[in-house]
């Protein structure tokens, strides 16, 4: 496991990147990382396993390019419900674009936040329990909060359902 501290200013932090020249095997670091981005508007790109992430102050973007091996915890997800520029954003564009069935659909069919947990349904049907993946626990969000989601084309919003 690693502890990454971004400090003040705007940072880009990418976790779990492995480059193997001449190999085609994908690898993953299954250890938990602690990420402290610090003050500023930060971009945090993660596909790890049960990382503990703090974006700090500022408008942070938490990016998921694939379903993580474990459920991350974002300790300070900022949602003020006034939809201003200081709100944090979940970037799920790359994750959603991996499946063309996400194109031109109702985002609420594929993404939800319930009990503070961000979930993605690969089938677009949350009644199909086998299709649901837990992505991250968002500390500080409550029922009826509005969360900004980047879907690859634009910023959309979803409402926390419980």
Image (cartoon, grey):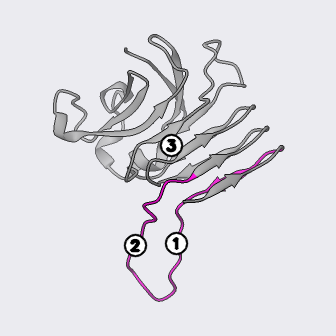
Please give the label number shown on residue 136.
Answer: none
| Numbered disc 2: secondary structure | loop
Q: Position of residue 148 (x, y in %)?
A: 55, 27
Q: Position of residue 82 (x, y in %)?
A: 65, 12
Q: Position of residue 97 (x, y in %)?
A: 40, 49
Instruction: Work out which quarter of the rendered image holds the N terminus and state it.
Output: bottom right
Where residue 96 sits, quadrant-wise, is: top left
Instruction: Work out which quarter of the rendered image holds the C terminus and state it.
Output: top left
Q: Mark 3 or 1 closer to N-term?
A: 1
* Badge 2 vs badge 1, beta-carbon distance below 8 Å: yes
Q: Residue furthest bottom?
A: 22
Q: Mark 2 or 1 closer to N-term?
A: 1
Q: CA distance from mark 3 to mark 1?
A: 24 Å
Mark nearer the viewer, 3 or 2: 2
Residue 91 falls left or right of residue 95: right
Residue 27 magenta-highlighted:
yes
Q: Which residues are magenta?
A: 9-33
Frontmost residue, 157 versus 104: 157
Residue 63 magenta-highlighted:
no
Residue that numbered label 1 is attached to = 18
* Badge 3 vs badge 2, beta-carbon distance below 8 Å: no
* Badge 3 vs badge 1, beta-carbon distance below 8 Å: no
Q: CA distance from mark 2 to mark 1?
A: 8 Å
Q: Callout 1: few (<14), some (14-19), or many (20+) C-alpha neighbours within 10 Å?
A: few
Q: Callout 2: few (<14), some (14-19), or many (20+) C-alpha neighbours within 10 Å?
A: few
Residue that numbered label 2 is attached to = 26
Residue that numbered label 3 is attached to = 152
């Amino acid at each position: 496991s690693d502890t990454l501290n971004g400090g003040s200013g705007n940072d880009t932090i990418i976790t779990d990147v492995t480059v193997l020249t001449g190999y085609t095997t994908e690898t993953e670091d299954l250890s938990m990382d602690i990420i402290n981005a610090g003050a500023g508007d930060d971009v945090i790109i993660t596909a790890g396993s049960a990382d503990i992430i703090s974006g700090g102050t500022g408008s942070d973007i938490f990016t998921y390019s694939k379903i993580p091996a474990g459920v991350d915890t974002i300790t300070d997800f900022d949602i003020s419900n006034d939809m201003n520029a200081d709100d944090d954003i979940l970037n799920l564009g790359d994750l959603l674009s991996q499946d063309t069935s996400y194109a031109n659909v109702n985002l609420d069919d594929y993404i939800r936040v319930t009990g503070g947990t961000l979930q993605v349904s690969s089938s677009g049907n949350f009644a199909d329990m086998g299709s649901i993946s837990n992505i991250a626990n968002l500390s500080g969000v409550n029922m009826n909060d509005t969360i900004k989601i980047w879907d690859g084309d634009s910023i959309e919003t979803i409402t926390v359902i419980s």
